[in-house]
Every structure is written in structure tokens, then in C-alpha cells.
Image (cartoon, rainbow, N blue to C red):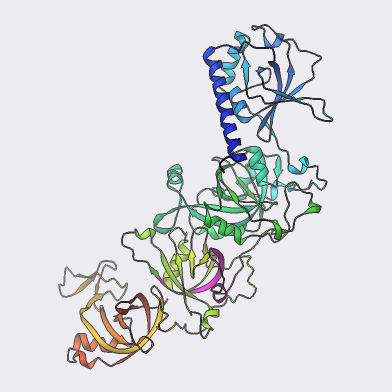
Amino acid sequence: LCRGGLAERLCRLQNRERSAISFWRHQCISDDKIPSDKSSVLIVKILEIFEECTIQVAICQQLEQSPAMLSPKDAVINAEEPILKVLFTRETAAHLKSRPQDVIHIYPPWQKLLLQNEDVPVIMNTYFSQKVLLSECSEAREKIYGLTKMLIRKNIISLAQTFRLEDLDEELHQESSDNRVACAPQIHNNGDSKQRPLALNAVNDSLLEMVESQGAVGWREVQVQVVIQRVYCLPAREGYRSHVQGNKLLGSNGGMFCRLCLLVQDAYGMFSEVQLQSLNSADDIEQYCRWEGKSCCLAGMKILQRTTRGRALGLFSMIDSLWPPVVPVKVHGQSQELEMMTTNLPPPSFCYVLTVQSGEIHVEVDEEEQISNLYQPPAVHGLKEILRIGGCNKRCSFWAQVLYQRLQTKYNIPIAQREILLFVTDSTLQNVVHGIPKVVAVSVAASCVLSMEIREALTAGSQLVFFKDALWGNGRIICVERTVLLLQKPLLCSAAGADLSEVPGSVRLDELDSTTQANSICALRGTVVGVNESTAFSWPTCNRCGNGKLELCPQDRESLYCSQCSEVVTTPVLKMQLEVFLRCPSRSQSTVKVKVWHKISIALFVLLTMLLFLQTYEVQSVLGKEVGLLNCYVHSVTSHPNCVALEEIVLL
């Protein structure tokens, strides 16, 4: 807060006010008596209690001064005094724990507000209030009632009613519940959902109004209708893992626990992230992705966090990709005839993270409803177009063919927390002549949830994968939290101008040159100028499963045995590794060191065989041989010394 500013002065005033109230209440309890000055004390008897906009409203009748031991039933009601409407803040109401028929003493400085065209005065500034027990029977009643929590009726006052807007949508949310499917993750069939319908009455279309009227504890008696913009999974925190020990959680990267999340938007353009309960398997994500674009009703929610742009960059990068709205949205406090254009609306600066309250059906999606006009499907672009996007932390969606994957080798980090590098391409990159690489590296962070279907597909061979809401910035594409990888084409995506076909024919890589960077793949051609004999070695592998840890057969010590196949290996496949030095015309000033593998390299197969096994040729006979094209992974590029270290790879 600015020193000496209005906000700082208001904060100090509120602190002094809270201190004064606490001191006054402590004094009343310690003295065990009502303050003696009763000249300006307002004594009221509560007739009815309800809540509006987090304020507790008590309909009361004013009492005359009565003896201290007078029963509430015998208290004299002043017929000349009108009925009063007394306002209590949430803190004061929690302290009083008032019920109908209770007698309350309200001490100064209370104020009476007379409203125009209203007969009932309003009493405000009721911080210094005390509930009075006037008899022993009242004390007994207080002990009994104190054990049970009183349910307070909550009146939901929409801003449309507050500002007397004429075009209230009275027909909203009148659909029959028979056409709805309860979609809390642990409930999957329609029969169960019909047996346990949401017994709710009021339906709202504003997340902000719902939060302000129901508070942070949560709402049960009302619903809010929203549009599901995105469906994804987030890694669960440690606290959430211990909280749901009895549930079967979704395992992803190395057994990471995850939970299903929805990014929803209301009719006023406000976003909220709804964190639902766990899934049974990661493959269910595709099933839930069908919810995108549908309207749903939320109930039984509670606020987990109110986050801002500075605290949740990943969440707001997703929100920014959906802003501005594609259709005009409602504006709080304005008639819809005076709607602001969506281009003039500032982007959201905060977002409520909601979570479910246990033991309830929390979300209802109308499966038969048409796609909402507010929904923004992912805009699919070609990789060539994405590489030309300016700025950073931009969400992008694209189809790409995965050519090669590699786990980052950081030995001080557990395998489950390491990044995976996926090298991808598409037809827009393969058709480029100069200036743009033909292959792009996509980093998959450990926080990005990958389904088992994606993992198995990438292991089996080259696949056409849909990357939804990846993060682009500083020349890198990163799959982080809220990024979804799918094999099937989404039901809805704006793919205008995007070529979704697989790359025809053989894939071309960029050849090694002065622009090649570490942690990339390239094609290599050159002339052998040296061989590192000290690092050459070979080992036998199983010809069936590829197991490289063969054992001597117990029955026949001259044969090899595979423990994975549980059979004798009669024709093992010999693998070899060797480092060679090449002279490349594209990097004439650099020392190019390549780690090559027998069983991989067709070009060097004959050379390695002659060198390692026949042993009738000297190294000099291998030098000067032409090699290429080899597909290689670039381990490092250094300038002092000027050296490039590569490893031969096999594309998927």
C-alpha cells in the first residue's frame, strides 16, 4: 500500500475497529455482565433470519426496557415501533449465533437508515451486539441449540435484479434433468445419475455472484451454469495424495498422481478452474475431452484458491489463449442493450480455483445440448506458422509426426521427473527450402500428463500426435501442465489452413552445419579421419527380444541363455559401439566425433566388421572412407575446443 494513501488509512482504521470490537467482547465476558449504560441501547427480538450477499439480515421487533429476568415470551413489544431490519456482518453473526426468538442488545454507535419508499428502517453498525439470556429456561435452550448448527436461508440476489435490468433471461436453465448425465468422475452410468439428481433450485450464470453470495465455504443449494472450455489433468499435490488414499488415482509419469480438471467460463466471461476427483486411468482423458464446448451446471463447490496472473502464469496463459471471447458477453451492472464489445474488455486479472466437496454429485453436463457459442476450440496451426509467432508464453495447438524421442539424462533428477524430448515435423516444415528447420524439438515436462496410449504409441513407432495447448516461447515448444497429447482427432478444432496429413515419403533432416545446436537431431555426411579404438566394444543380444544381458546356459556352458525369453539363444545378434572422427564440409573448422552402433549403421557396418573382427586391415585402411547420410543426435557443441559430439540414432 502507498504510504499515507487512502488504502493504508482504511486498513489502519479497519485494524483499530477489529481491535475495539475484540476488546469490547472480552470486557463483556470477563465482567460477566451487560454494560451499565443503557440509555442508547437498542433491544430487539429476532423474528426471522436470512442471508444476502454475505450479510445476515434479521427481521426484528423492538422491545421496551424490561427487567433482566423477564422471559422472552413475556417481553413487551412496543406496538408503536415499526419492525426493524437489522444487518449483522458475517463475523458478528458467527459470534452471536442468533436464532429466532433471541433477544439482542445493540450498543452504540448503531445507526438507523430510512430508505425511500420503504416502511422498515434498517439498523447498521451492529458490531457491538450481545445476545441476552433472560432466564434459566433460555440458558437450557441455548445449551441444546448450541449443539446443532442452524441452517440459514440464503437469498441469491442477481446483479440484474439489483440494477433492475429489463431483459432478464427467465427461460434459462429450464431443461429437464432427465436429459442430463451426472459426470462426477466416480459416476459413469446414466442410471445412477437419475437416481441421485441434484436437488437444487436456483441456477445462476455468474461465477462472481456465486462466490460473493455463497462465500468461500462452498455452495450447496444453488447451481451456476458455465461452458467447459478445456479438459485436462493436473499432477496432484502431496496433500491431495494423502487426502485420497482410499481412491484409485491416475498414474502417469512414473506413478505420478493426477486429477481431472475443467477450465470453465461463465456468461460474463469470467474463468474458473474446477479440480475434480481422480480418474481410474489416464486413457479416460479422451473420453472427458468430449465435454469441451458443452454447458454444465456446477454445485457443491468450494473455493480452493483465488489466484492472480503473477501467481499462476501457466493458468493465465491458457486463459489468454481464450481471450477475448468469440461472442459478446454480459457485463456486470449494465443492460444487455449497452453491451461492451468484447475487444474492449480487459483480460481477467484473477481466477478462482474450485474443488469438489466430498460425497456429492458436483457437475452436470447436458450430453445432448448443442455446442455453446462461447466455446473456443483450439486453433490448429502448422509448425512453420508457430515458429514465426512473436512473444512468449503463447499457447499453440498442432498436429505433428513424432520421429524420435529421448529422455533427458540428468543423473541428479529421478527418472520420473526428467523431461522427454520429442522431435517432430509436419508437411509445412518438410516443404521448406531454407531458413526454417525441418525438425523441431518439443520438450515434455514431467508435469505434463501422458496417457498410457500415447506412451505405447511412441514406443511402437512414428505417430501423428495432436499437441493441444502446448506452450511456445523463447524459440521452444514445451508441453507443461494443462497440455494434452492425443492420438485421435478432437471432435472440434478450427483447423483452417492447417495440413493434418502425414508427411509423405521419407523424412528429411537438416544437415549438420554452423547453425546446429545441442539437443537436436540432424543428418551427417563426411570422411573418416580417425577411430577411437579404446572406446570400441561389442556385446551379444537376444535375437528374439533384444535383451543385452545374456547369461551362460547352466546345461551347456558354451551356449547363451536369455532370462527374459527363458530360452537358449542359438543365434545371438552382435552389437558394437565405436567412436569415429569425421571431416565434414559443412563444419570444416570443427572436430566431429560420432558414436556409431553396429546393427544401426548400414554405412559403417562393413568398416566396423573389418576393423573389429577380421583384424586383417589396419586403421589406416578405414581412414578416408566416405560416410553418409547418418541420422544423429547432437550431444554437445563447443567452441573451445571447436568440437561437435553426436550419436547415431534410428528414427521411429
Image quarter in which the C terminus is found: bottom left
Q: How many marks?
A: 0
Nearer to the camera, 581 or 199 = 581
Nearer to the camera, 31 or 244 = 31
Q: Position of residue 430 (x, y in %)?
A: 51, 82
As drawn, which residue projects farthest toward the left? 557
| Residue 612 relative to residue 17: left or right | left
Q: Position of residue 94 (x, y in %)?
A: 59, 27
Q: Position of residue 76 (x, y in %)?
A: 74, 10
| Image: 412 above or below 245 | below
As drawn, which residue projects farthest toward the right? 117
Image quarter in which the N terminus is found: top right
Nearer to the camera, 468 or 109 = 109
Q: Quadrant of residue 221?
A: top right
The magenta stretch spans which residues? 380-405
Q: Quadrant of residue 519?
A: bottom left
Q: Quadrant of residue 527?
A: bottom left
Visible in this render: residue 251?
A: yes
| Image: 320 above or below 503 | above
Visible in this render: residue 102?
A: no
Q: Is residue 541 magenta?
A: no
Q: Is residue 386 magenta?
A: yes
At 59% from the left and 12% from the top, the residue drawn is 139
Q: Position of residue 394 (x, y in %)?
A: 56, 64
| Image: 415 above or below 244 | below
| Image: 644 above or below 89 | below
Nearer to the camera, 351 or 509 = 351
